[in-house]
Amino acid sequence: MKTQKEKAHTFCALHRREGAFLIPNPWDAGSAKLLAGLGFEALATTSAGFAHTLGRFDGEVSRQEKLEHCRLLAEATDLPVSADLENGFAHEPEQAAETFLLAAEAGVVGGSIEDFSGDRDQPIYDLSQAVERVHAAVEAARSLDFPFTLTARAENFLHDRPDLDDTLRRLQAFEAVGADVLYAPGLTTLEDVRTVTSALSKPVNVLAPFVAGATVQDLADAGAKRLSVGALLGRAVLTPLLEASREMLDRGEFGWTAKATSGEEVQRLFAGAS
């Protein structure tokens, strides 16, 4: 297995090369191994995808559960893993920053902090508090003995605040205090992606499926560096599961088995992840 430092340097290099790279979001060790076996170069956790494996909604996972999940995925393959650490599981900057140190101990080489407060009535932290939180997380990351890639997220578009100007102010402020990657999940047009990437000098992550019809090349041409899919890959896997289950329950049939991936294919991909 590669060391954490080796994974960290590999992850940094992906952000420096030309074009955009895909960073899919597995929800458990098995899906991580399958994605690694297919040939992806890095992985990112998904808070909603992990919560769903526990039968819960997004935001209902404890920090300790999230850290164990980080450890499980970091140990599953040789690929670098970046963790969705939500709001750092704390409002205060110092406590949120501690989460990043603990995640690094769990084996991940990057992580994101968002300005979503978890309060549905006041979902987005005030700008000054949001910046303080990112700054504290950056300082924690810089204290490590390897290059931890810190991603700062502006969550307006996911919480009914499609204010691009405010989103840009936030991302620029996060960049100014040292964030390595900037991310505004929920952008829906290539024009908005271009507006964001042109206003920043650091790499930008885009939640690719939200930009309807856009290809990897389209997003790369718009300036995106890193393309993730959030919980959508996990939800896509649920579709055939539900269809097969309904076929059995409603029609008493098993036609879905003709499309089932073979055990040999699963073993081949698992072996390729080693």
Image (cartoon, helix red, strand yellow):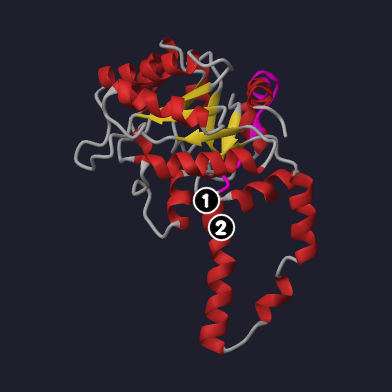
**Above or below, comparing residue 80 to residue 142 in the picture:** below
The picture places residue 120, in percent across and down from the top left corner, at 23, 43
Q: Is residue 260 left or right of residue 58?
A: right
Q: Residue at x 58, y 42 (%)?
A: 73
The picture places residue 179, in percent across and down from the top left corner, at 46, 17
Q: Amino acid at mark 1?
A: Leu
**Above or below, comparing residue 172 to residue 66 in the picture:** above
Q: Residue at x 44, y 42 (%)?
A: 66
Q: Quadrant of residue 90?
A: top left
Q: Is residue 39 left or right of residue 249?
A: right
Quick one: SS at disc 2? helix
Q: Amino acid at mark 2?
A: Ala
Residue 214 visible, this orientation: no
| Whether label 1 touches label 2, CB < 8 Å | yes
Magenta stretch, residue numbers: 13-26
Q: Which residue is mark 1?
A: 232
| Mark number displayed over residue 91 | none
Q: Residue at x 68, y 48 (%)?
A: 33
The picture places residue 135, in percent across and down from the top left corner, at 38, 15
Q: Which residue is mark 2?
A: 236
Q: Is residue 15 magenta?
A: yes
